[in-house]
Image (spheres, rainbow, N blue to C red):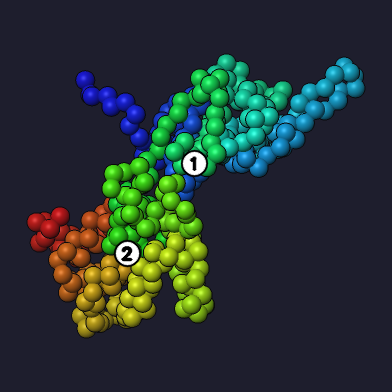
């Protein structure tokens, strides 16, 4: 029998699987700010093939949940739910009650019947038996105003969702159109995705820490924002980009990201690399090599992978293996790599690096 470790956290992927396989249970997902809890709504809906409804609980008033409507024939009233819940469509919906633990008590009371196992309902409308409802909130130690009463806690299953590690985030980022400069920065400085709940992070200048006065900080959410800023760097001046990055991921994160932007702007173009892989100059610094490797994974096609492998073989073995390992873990690029003879030949020759 496997050992049970009480209080253990779950990953985002594990939380998605628990919700999909236990649709009748109301899970409450707790985690640090910006780690991707809200992004699970679409992941769950896509997996189940359902529509989805995002419910921003702290910004709701009672009228945003349901309204009394007069039935003049019976001289009674009924509660009609707001259209945002999509329960009127008569088909299964995944509903996320986002930041439920920060909502006003009257709003939480109105939403409470949705948490019942027997005949869950919203207003006077019973929920479809296939509907999925889950809640999100922050850790109590985050100090951002989360509160649940005992009768609510007894109706839900609370899960602590772990902050993604740098490797987990990079795997996601390579499938999510994140700029290679940002991926390379996280690869070089994995501590940007450490958690304040881990030991020895008191002096980490990048991360959210409720024990310190905080401005901007690095999180999966703010890294995605940083990627959008980096993507527009050709359309803005250098000072504007650095100021925007500082506002997104903090001064320490922006300073490190600046170096990777400078590396990137000095590299040969992708077109030049593919056109003449044997003669196009190769970078010498580790930061520039990382940008080339992670950028290639995002750009590679069936037509370009063979010349890129020729170019890559001029790199240090470490970077060749980083490319091979990460492209093999990227679902959208696996088939391209595994069907390429040049890639297969490289794997056969370099199995000791993998």
Residue 168 coordinates in the image, percent (x, y) = 33, 49
- Whether tag 1 and tag 2 are in contact, CB under 8 A, the answer is no
Q: Residues within 10 Å of mark 2 (few under 14, many from 20)?
A: many
Comparing 101 with 317, the one in front is 101
For the point 34% across and 55% down, which residue is it?
A: 204
Looking at the rendered structure, the secondary structure element under dot 2 is helix
Q: Quadrant of residue 187?
A: bottom left
Q: Name the residue under label 1.
A: 143
Residue 135 coordinates in the image, percent (x, y) = 53, 34
Comparing 182 with 141, the one in front is 141
For the point 44% across and 46% down, which residue is it?
A: 210
Residue 307 coordinates in the image, percent (x, y) = 25, 73
Please determine whether, in this image, residue 15 is positioned above or below residue 353. Answer: above
Whether residue 44 is visible, yes or no, is no
Q: How crowded is mark 1: few (under 14 residues within 10 Å), some or many (20 or more)?
A: few
Please determine whether, in this image, residue 200 is positioned above or below residue 18. Answer: below
Q: Name the residue under label 2.
A: 184
Q: Which quadrant of the rendered structure holds the N terminus?
A: top left
| In this view, the mark in front (1 or 2) | 1
Determine the CA span between mark 1 and mark 2. Answer: 32 Å
Looking at the rendered structure, the secondary structure element under dot 1 is loop
Q: Which quadrant of the rendered structure holds the C terminus?
A: bottom left
Q: Quadrant of residue 128?
A: top right
In the rendered structure, the answer to whether residue 332 lies left or right of residue 107 reads: left
In the rendered structure, the answer to whether residue 28 lies left or right of residue 257 reads: right
């Amino acid at each position: 029998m496997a050992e049970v470790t009480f209080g253990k956290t779950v990953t985002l992927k594990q939380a998605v699987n628990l919700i999909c396989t236990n649709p009748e249970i109301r899970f409450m997902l707790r985690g640090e700010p910006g780690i991707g809890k809200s992004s699970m709504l679409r992941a769950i809906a896509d997996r189940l093939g359902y529509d989805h409804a995002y419910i921003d609980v702290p910004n709701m008033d009672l009228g945003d949940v349901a309204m009394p409507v007069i039935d003049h024939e019976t001289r009674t009233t009924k509660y009609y739910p707001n259209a945002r819940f999509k329960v009127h469509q008569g088909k299964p919906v995944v509903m996320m009650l986002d930041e439920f633990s920060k909502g006003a008590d009257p709003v939480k009371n109105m939403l409470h019947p949705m948490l019942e196992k027997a005949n869950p309902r919203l207003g006077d409308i019973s929920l479809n038996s296939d509907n999925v409802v889950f809640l999100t909130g922050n850790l109590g130690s985050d100090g951002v105003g989360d509160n649940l009463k005992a009768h609510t806690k007894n109706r839900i299953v609370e899960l602590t969702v772990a902050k993604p590690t740098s490797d987990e985030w990079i795997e996601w980022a390579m499938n999510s159109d994140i700029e290679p400069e940002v991926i390379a920065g996280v690869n070089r400085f994995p501590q940007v995705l450490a958690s304040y709940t881990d030991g020895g992070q008191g002096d980490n200048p990048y991360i959210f820490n409720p024990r310190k006065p905080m401005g901007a900080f690095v999180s999966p959410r703010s890294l995605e924002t940083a990627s959008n800023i980096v993507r527009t760097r050709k359309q803005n001046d250098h000072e504007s980009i650095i100021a925007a990055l500082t506002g997104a991921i903090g001064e320490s994160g922006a300073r490190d990201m600046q170096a990777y932007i400078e590396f990137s702007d000095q590299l040969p173009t992708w077109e030049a690399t593919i056109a003449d892989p044997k003669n196009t100059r190769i970078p010498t610094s580790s930061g520039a090599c990382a940008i080339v490797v992670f950028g290639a994974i995002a750009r590679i096609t069936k037509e370009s992978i063979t010349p890129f492998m020729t170019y890559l073989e001029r790199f240090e073995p470490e970077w060749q293996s980083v490319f091979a390992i990460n492209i093999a873990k990227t679902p959208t690029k696996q088939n391209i790599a595994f069907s390429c003879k040049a890639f297969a030949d490289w794997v056969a020759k370099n199995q000791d690096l993998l």
